[in-house]
Amino acid sequence: MCGIFGCVLRNEMAGPIIRSALERLEYRGYDSIGQATLSSGKIFVKKDKGKISEVQKTLNFDEMLGKLGLGHTRWATHGMPSKENAHPHLDCDGNIAVVHNGIIENFMELRKNLEPKHKFRSRTDSEVISHLIEDYMEEGENLEEATRLTAKRIKGSFAVAAISNQEHDKLVCIKKESPLIVGVGEEGVYCSSDMSALLPLTKNALIMEDGELGVLKIDEIKFIKIKNGESVKKEITKIEWTLSDAMKGGYPHFTIKEINEQPTSIRNTLRISPIYHELIASKLCDSERIFLIACGTSYHACIAGSYLFSKISKIDSRPVIASEFKDQYSEILNSKTAIIALSQSGETADTIEALKTVREKKASILSITNVMGSSITRFSDIYIGQNSGPEIGVAATKSFTSQLAILTKLALTMATKRNSMDEENRREIDRGLKTLPSYIEKVIERVDDKVKSIAKKYVDSESFSFLGRGINSATALEGRLKLLELTYTPSLAYPAGEVKHGFIATVESNRPAIFIAPRDDNHNKIINNIMELKSRGAKIISLIEKDDKKIIEMSDDYIEMPQMHALLTPLTYIVPLQLFAYYMAVEKDLDPDKPRHLAKSVTVE
Ligand code: F6R
């Protein structure tokens, strides 16, 4: 999730206007920043790795004059944070500058075709855009048509702004599945990834839809369809938001925004080139021993991941809490061991310490992280980026589902290599994964109000227990962690089969039990567990597949979920639990974005 901004101005102030717009977009990405302006017929670019405030000290973007310009704040997906990989990207001769937010899925193939003729300077997927536009302009197209034709060639998601020194009065922008808004002000026209950058400049916005191209000139704005060049009419929308509303996309908190972003973040996660999965899967298949290590939410993804590895890939792996790893396992590591480290931040001290031991023992380090260039990516032999975009709420939400989506893909890739699952079943899971974003969209839409009312009803409960079986014992742990973090409510999480071995003694009516109970192979057993607790006076809240009459009858409250492959259920059943924790925090008047005593990135052991 990067931030892009572009402007066409009456005055020459492009440099400072873009810089201050990027400061307001920085929450969308902050590993690199760059700007391009057009002045005296030439394009000037300043860019570097680092936060805006740091880079501004050395590069001083405010000195960049011009009426036309672009800017970008980056959250790396393809290519580490570096000066070369920072946007804007130029064509070979520096006549065209481009900024991009999104993921170009077919960039490798496009780059291969372009490389013999073009000079690439970065490792990003985005740079193909400037070279494609260059080719079309060389063939005689203007910037508008060259950008339209380029948009038809690229697959994936994009919000792109482009300028050329051949057409000094305009900026061209295109959109598909990444946000883009056009602002119309007295002093200029603008395009931006979101409202936050537009706020001090104008309250008049034109919202771009997928598949559209905009041509912005100071006194004329036009929109066309990328598909066929047909003209599109738009009405001005008045922006009534404050800056903080705008950054949160209109949601009251980042946490709820990020819960709602999961369809998009999973879509982006699944866009990662299969090559990365192939590399990691090969390494895992060749290893004698596999550990999945992490802390907190990432550890819960490891637990679910180890179920997926054994059930789909028929391969043994062990999830281990990073802070315990060295103590228990350092003596049995060797070069035939593979470690998968999961970390949203890529900076968690306990995970890094565990990896130091792993490195000493020459085991392979494979990682899944949301922050490219983080310590954990630097420690790793191979890594996969989560592509979740920055997660600002302290509690991990969208990063959990992205990590799990990657682990599911890895398990499927290993299954193909090892021929460990019948093809039909493997395909069913693969198809399920692809439809997951739209399923989650529906889940959020359907359950949001119900979860809110359940949170209201149970807000004064003394504690909760979260119970699931099989892969959903990981969902139970993660649901419990969300509630703990956001509401400080003491709660338990158990594999449901374990309740009779002690936990059952704690059952009371003011301690509701939340059952994660899809209609899977464990269904009958979990019904027994529900009965065990119900008969001892527990209030039952259940997460069930639609129309599961048996469990509905036993439940005080229930949330119905769509039917899906049993192994994909943690990816969706966690969503109502995230919502539950969030609405409980709101009911209790707590700040869900910043729970007390917690840090987003735990950099001490
Ligand atoms: C849970 C949470 C923490 C982190 C843990 C690991 O909501 O935010 O428990 O999951 O600190 O962090 P990463 O994934 O950055 O290594």
Image: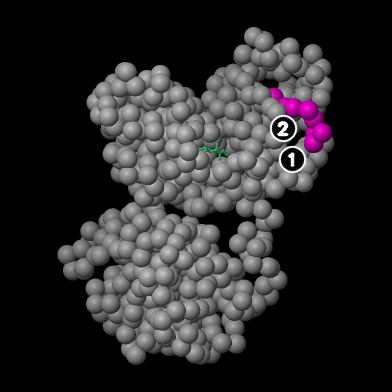
What secondary structure is marked by label 1?
helix
* Residue 443 appears left or right of 137: right
Residue placed at 36% from the left, 56% from the top?
A: 81
Give the vertical position of 373 relative to 32 (above or below).
above
Closer-to-camera residue (272/486): 486
Q: Residues within 10 Å of mark 2 (few under 14, many from 20)?
A: many
Q: Is residue 565 visible?
A: no
Q: Position of residue 562 (x, y in %)?
A: 63, 36
Give the vertical position of 284 relative to 438 (above or below).
above
The residue carrying mark 1 has its beta carbon less than 8 Å from ligand 1:
no
Q: Report the number of discs.
A: 2
**Is 56 in the magenta?**
no
Q: Which residue is mark 2?
A: 489
Question: Residue 584: which disc?
Answer: 1
Range of residues picked out in magenta: 458-465
Q: What's the amino acid at mark 1?
A: Met
Q: Name the quadrant containing residue 422.
A: top left
Residue placed at 50% from the left, 78% from the top?
A: 17
Q: What's the amino acid at mark 2?
A: Thr
| Sequence order check, earlier mark of 2 and 1 | 2
Q: In the current view of this chain or complex, which residue is farthest to the left?
A: 116
User: Nearer the observer, disc 2 or disc 1?
Assistant: 2
What secondary structure is marked by label 2?
loop
Q: Are marks 2 and 1 in contact (CB under 8 Å)?
A: yes
Q: Position of residue 130 (x, y in %)?
A: 32, 70
Q: Position of residue 485 (x, y in %)?
A: 64, 37
Q: Give me the C-alpha separation between circle 2 and circle 1.
A: 10 Å
Prevalent SS, magenta region: loop
